[in-house]
Amino acid sequence: MELRDEWLVLRPWREDDAPAVYEACQDPEILHWAPVIPRPYTEEDALAFVTGKLDLGPHQYAIEEDGRPVGSIGVRVNEQTRTGHIGYWCAREARGRGLMTRALRLLCGYAFEDLALERLELFTDPDNLASQRVAGKVGFRREGVLRSHLLHPDGRRRDSVMFSLLPGELVPSSRG
Ligand SMILES: CC(C)(COP(=O)(O)OP(=O)(O)OC[C@H]1O[C@@H](n2cnc3c(N)ncnc32)[C@H](O)[C@@H]1OP(=O)(O)O)[C@@H](O)C(=O)NCCC(=O)NCCS
């Protein structure tokens, strides 16, 4: 199913999105901040992602603009705890226009209202200020630092900053 606001569409990934995902994930910034993304990032990696082979669950969306996928956002649901973990990236050329803030707001609304989740969380690198700003604009609260949380493929161990959002805390777009 698709999620929409006045001008943004989040839609399920399709096999023919693989080239766009491959292109976007050549960006060193995405690789720098997202250690789970394989490197070098191959066309096969992109195909596995868009065809749902990565075990990320059913709520993974392409952020579409002018008919083209320009970003990715998804929530992995833990049915037992009624919680969701959110991840996202935006293609370099589409950044800085409020796209991810809108996409995150849309996904969080869906997660609370339709999936009935009771806690959403995301974590970022402590130095990833753009991602933290996006989370903050949507209403996520900074909970604390997960020390030595992630091992990057280049051997760096990095802390993460944990953010969470509870029902009723989502900031509507007029204030974002
Ligand atoms: C983080 C990311 C998804 C943001 O996407 P986006 O569509 O550009 O986000 P938005 O335009 O909605 O908002 C970005 C905000 O961060 C701010 N920002 C950008 N770079 C910043 C920086 N270096 N320091 C502080 N704030 C910064 C912008 O000014 C904007 O805030 P504002 O609206 O108050 O001006 C995108 O930069 C990205 O994909 N980065 C690489 C991958 C990544 O980091 N993924 C997240 C892993 S947790």
Image (cartoon, rainbow, N blue to C red):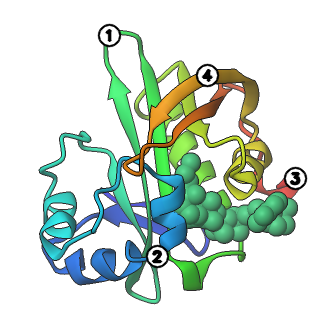
2 or 3: mark nearer the eye = 2
Q: Reply above or below: 155 against 65.
A: above
Label 4, label 3: how many angstroms apart (C-alpha)? 29 Å
Disc number placed over residue 146 in the picture, else none: 4
Inspect the image, locate mark 2, and give the three-letter code of the amino acid beneath it.
Asp
Asked which secondary structure carries label 4, the reply is strand
The answer to whether marks 3 and 1 mark residues whose Cβ atoms lie closer than 8 Å is: no
In this view, the residue farthest toward the right is 175
Identity of the amino acid at label 3?
Arg
The quarter of the image holding the C terminus is bottom right
Label 4: few (<14), some (14–19) or many (≥20) C-alpha neighbours in 10 Å: some
Q: Nearer the viewer, mark 1 or mark 2?
A: 2
**Image point 77% across, 51% down: which residue?**
133
Q: Quadrant of residue 147?
A: top right
Is disc 2 in contact with disc 4, using a CB cutoff of under 8 Å?
no
Which residue shows up at 41% across the image and 51% down it?
Answer: 154
Residue 45 on image: x %, y %: 18, 64
